[in-house]
Image (tube, rainbow, N blue to C red):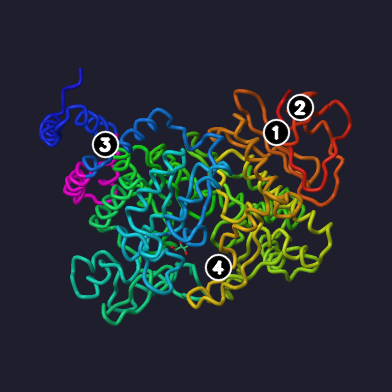
Amino acid sequence: MPQPDPFRTLLAGQLRQAFDDDRDADTFLLRLDRYGPELKASLQATYGDAAPALMDRLLELMLHAYHARPADLKRLDEARLLSPDWLQEPGMLGYVAYTDRFAGTLKGVREHLDYLQNLGVTYLHLMPLLQPRPGENDGGYAVADYRAVRSDLGSMDDLSALAADLRARGVSLVLDLVLNHVAQEHEWARQARAGDPTYREYFHVFPDRTVPDAFERTLPEVFPDFAPGNFTWNEEAGGWVWTTFNTYQWDLNWSNPSVLAEFVDIILHLANRGVEVFRLDAIAFMWKRLGTDCQNQPEVHHITQALRACARIVAPAVAFKAEAIVAPADLIHYLGTGEHHGRVSDMAYHNSLMVQLWSSLASRDTRLFAGALRAFPPKPTSTTWGLYVRCHDDIGWAISDADASRAGLDGAAHRHFLSDFYSGEHPGTFARGLVFQFNPQTGDRRISGTAASLAGLEDALESGDPRHVEAAVRRLLLLHAVTLGFGGLPLLYMGDELALLNDHSFADIPEHAADNRWVHRPRMDWERAADAQANPGTPHGRVNAGLRHLIGVRQGLPHLHASIESHAVPSPDPCVLLLRRDHPQGVMLAAYNFSEHTIDFPAWALRDHLGDHARDHIAATAFNLGGGTVTLEPYRALWLTQS
Ligand code: GLC
């Protein structure tokens, strides 16, 4: 029999005194037993000798937060522990919106809950809404106070009330947690500038260019256009401050244990307000190491493990989503590989899938797509992908030279083609996008634009040609079908359910004018929402109805549980992508025609996976695969199972 650990017995004795209720004490101690070792290990790996003192500090913060956790959230914790795969279920659907652009205020959002529920939403990501710096603030990603809500949107109490309303309807509230940087107006940065050595240690400040120049040799630029370089001189601080993103976003020094303690406290505080999922913003950049690109460093995963262990002890209902827009081989570690398996983020953005959707749509060729998926490392079965057609950010052509050459393409030339295509420069293109952050050194041109404008609806409506409109509607529904049919958590970007077009008025708002990502962050058009229902034959009505239909079908397909992977299988036609899912309830095969042509697709290519008889769940039709060919109309999507 294992000997009781004397330290643990002592700790348990002391901790019990901190509780009135024995059951509460038991719960806390059990969770500490479960997650304490991984917390300690990650602190040790990151902070070495400073780890034990940090552990004591965290224990105090956790006890405090556990006591403060409201009863209904403790109940949610229990419920989630009973359904650890809640994020993977096919009924989950995300919606991503700016509070003000969607409904004015947090109270306004509460008035639109029927709309969201009616769409099937179970996960609501409200874009950055914590108090940002005044003026330009990178869409709220420059946070000045993590404990206050942007005053024009409401208060912390409004946020809790909204979270409670959402919870009652089975919808999880998701917020951004900006980890890499704070606004230069944040109290910590103010104190640092005022000369307080404690807070100066929260940042990376260098007296001269020696260290910054050494780092710059291997650092890429995130915003080469409006914020070149990674360091900004600050007169008051008398030094060069690390600013990966905009000059007013000060990178935090995560090698300082106090920064970790601050964020544990912030996470638990917000979790007790009802936040269920944290989107770990710009997580890849948190740890700096000379001679590297300062992304994806091993310490990032140790730190995430520590943050998650604390969240699991106090608020196990909480999940983490990593926002790491990095290469697949790096990305997979954010979902937990090796020693971090099952211990870091529950979810990560599948940026590559999004990029490949747009790439195949432009080239009418899915070979690069299929090859990239085949080369993708498998994800841990307990995690899920965040799947999206568009988000609030630009599209960067994250297509590796290796993937391109496997598909017989030159990487640089293909990326160049995609930028031309989506900026509207390529002859015959249907897309209307804008170039974001042209980098003359690398030739990179990222792209802004709403899904509808990039898929050709803006151009088609202007042309007045109904065939173009038809094609654009079909393209949009194809893209949604792939993300909804991939097995993960689809994240609908606000307005895409109504095919909202580019908002060219963004340039009228001085704080937005320089950042054309605002072209695809339009205001919600509630009239159009009503019209889509009233006039289902309009382009936005058709996209809306088609999308709702796909969402409904998906909810009833157990094959789409995210624990199972989608595998690209060989397709005899380059225009058609075939994705196979091996679910215990049977094989599911999805077929997607990425071209405007009607294709006579060889039936054997489907029969090999499904046998002679299949059912397409989208059109609710039976398919006899015994014959020679199956007709695939332009941009047609099939979700087939054996019948
Ligand atoms: C993330 C956000 C992006 C923001 C950046 C800096 O990438 O998605 O909008 O500019 O982080 O916080």
Tell me where residue 553 appears, x and y as whole percent: 65, 35
Main SS of residues in magenta: helix
Q: Quadrant of residue 254?
A: bottom left
Callout 2 secondary element:
strand
What's under tag 3, amino acid-wise? Pro
Taking the image as drawn, is residue 288 in sight? no
Choose between 93 and 261: the one closer to the eye: 93
Q: Nearer the viewer, mark 1 or mark 4?
A: 4
What's under tag 1, amino acid-wise? Leu
Asked whether mark 4 and ligand 1 are closer than 8 Å, the reply comes as no
Report how far apart the C-alphas of labels 4 and 3 lie in the structure: 45 Å
Taking the image as drawn, is residue 298 in sight? yes
Residue 589's label in the rendered image is 1
Q: Quadrant of residue 83?
A: top left
| Quadrant position of the C terminus in the picture | top right
Q: Nearer the viewer, mark 2 or mark 1?
A: 2
How packed mark 4 is, by other alpha carbons closer than 10 Å (few <14, some 14-19, many 20 or more), is: many
Q: Which residue is mark 2?
A: 614
Looking at the image, how many numbered discs can be counted on the residues?
Answer: 4
Tell me where residue 240 appears, x and y as whole percent: 33, 76
For the point 79% across and 54% down, the residue is 471
Report how far apart the C-alphas of labels 2 and 4 lie in the structure: 44 Å
What's under tag 2, amino acid-wise? Ala
Q: Which residue is mark 4?
A: 518
> Compared to 42, does 30 lie above or below?
above
The answer to which of marks 4 and 3 sits earlier in the sequence is 3
Residue 462's label in the rendered image is none
